[in-house]
Image (cartoon, rainbow, N blue to C red):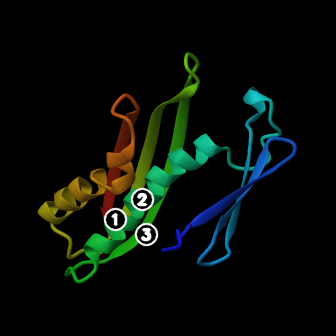
Amino acid sequence: MAEQWNYTVSYQHPLRTTNTHLASGETVLTDAPTDNHGLGQAFSPTDLLSTSLAACVATIMGIHVEGKPYDLVRLDAKVQKTMAAQPRRVAAIAIAFEIEVSSEASDQDLAVLERVARACPVAKSLHPDLEQNLSFAFTRV
């Protein structure tokens, strides 16, 4: 049985990669950050790690509200990454979610939605030493 690969990564000098999603052909560039010998002209790999947590939360919330008596009208997130030096790694990710839901959402619906969001697969895959600071501001519209 042949191995089925999902993605490819190609190194491009200087300190850049092209990452391809094989099923769709979509690509994402990464660039080393300016504080680590790079040009900082694209997301760094640690930027993608941080934003993937926000994207995962948003996706899980969207999945959760399917078939519910309320809608997810708008979701925006601001992401902040904090690096540690020894060893160089992502030490903390702070994400502020601003979420508009339709007026049919109850307080209990929003509590469940937040609990489901905090249990997204990316959140559960990150090392426990990586601090995850997620805040949720819900507005009914």
Q: Between marks 1 and 3, how big is the CA–CA gap? A: 14 Å
| CB-based contact (under 8 Å), mark 1 and mark 3 | no
Q: Earlier in the sequence, mark 3 or mark 2?
A: 2
Numbered mark located on residue 74 in the image: 3
In percent of width and height, residue 20 lies at: 67, 66
Type of the residue with mark 2: Cys
Task: Write the residue at 32% across / 56% down.
Answer: 120
Q: Is residue 3 above or below residue 36?
A: below
In percent of width and height, residue 114 lies at: 25, 55
**Mark 2 surroundings: few (<14), some (14-19) or many (≥20) residues within 10 A:** some
Callout 2 secondary element: helix
> Would you identify the image quadrant in which residue 117 lies?
bottom left
Callout 3 secondary element: strand
Closer to the camera in the image, 4 or 65: 4
Type of the residue with mark 3: Arg
Count of labels shown? 3
Task: State left or right for residue 132 relative to residue 114.
Answer: right
Identify the residue position indicated by label 1 in the image: 60
Identify the residue position indicated by label 2 in the image: 56
Task: Write the residue at 31% across / 58% down.
Answer: 138
Q: Between marks 2 and 1, how big is the CA–CA gap? A: 6 Å
Q: Is residue 77 above or below residue 72?
A: above
Numbered mark located on residue 141 in the image: none
Q: Earlier in the sequence, mark 1 or mark 3?
A: 1
Closer to the camera in the image, 116 or 121: 121
Task: Write the residue at 40% across / 62% down.
Answer: 58
Type of the residue with mark 1: Ile
**In the image, farthest residue toward the left:** 108
Q: Between marks 3 and 2, how big is the CA–CA gap? A: 15 Å
